Image (cartoon, rainbow, N blue to C red):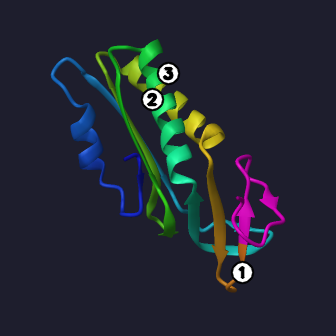
Amino acid sequence: MRLSRAPIVLDELLAQVTAPERGGTCVFVGTVRNDRGAHGVVTAIEYRAYDAMAERELERIVAEARDVHPETSVAVRHRLGRVGLGEASVAVVAAAPHRADAFTVCRRVIEDVKHRVPIWKRELHADGTGTWIDQEGRAVPLQEAPQ
């Protein structure tokens, strides 16, 4: 599973991609920040997804990365549920024979995850309100999660 309701453990992801022939490893970790936007201070983010669809798209993204860089191994994990300040919400680990490929694959995978995977996020604010955010970072006028 690439989706998890449990905290992300980087050592697990590193173990999935590490091998003696892969000398470069790149790690990206996205954490919840206390962004102060138009709706107030963010205290946590709630992530929701249609799990089966999101898992399939994550698989496609990893497969596409392997097609372009077959010597690179990739591990991805995205949290669902409530994720507090400073906690990791997404992690991508890419290992390749050379650092340039590891950086390239890691960046490509996180960008594809952000733009293609149907995971919805709701910023939770200190005043008890919440704001749904689209994949471009814009607030959307929804009261409940997109269906």
Q: Which residue is mark 3?
A: 64
Disc 2 to disc 1, C-alpha distance: 35 Å
| Circle 2 crowding by C-alpha within 10 Å: few under 14, some 14–19, many from 20 | some
Please tell me whether residue 51 is drawn above or below residue 20 in the rendered image: below
Give whichever of 113, 26 is nearer the camera.
Answer: 113
Q: Which residue is mark 1?
A: 129
Residue 5 in picture, x, y percent from top left = 41, 63
Please tell me whether residue 103 is drawn above or below residue 71 in the rendered image: below
| Circle 1 crowding by C-alpha within 10 Å: few under 14, some 14–19, many from 20 | few
SS at circle 2:
helix
SS at circle 1:
loop
> Residue, x 24% and y 48% (percent of image)?
11
Q: Position of 6 compared to 81: left or right?
A: left
> Residue, x 70% and y 48% (percent of image)?
135
Q: Earlier in the sequence, mark 3 or mark 1?
A: 3
Q: Earlier in the sequence, mark 2 or mark 1?
A: 2
Residue 145 forms part of the magenta stretch? yes
SS at circle 3:
helix
- Classify the position of the C terminus by image quarter: bottom right
Q: Magenta residues? A: 131-147
Q: Are marks 2 and 3 in contact (CB under 8 Å)?
A: yes
Q: Position of 9 compared to 102: left or right?
A: left
Taking the view exactly as shown, the residue that stands out farthest to the right is: 141
Taking the view exactly as shown, the residue that stands out farthest to the left is: 20
> Residue, x 63% and y 60% (percent of image)?
121
Q: Name which residue type carries label 2.
A: Val
Residue 17 in picture, x, y percent from top left = 27, 32
Residue 88 forms part of the magenta stretch? no
Q: Name which residue type carries label 3.
A: Glu
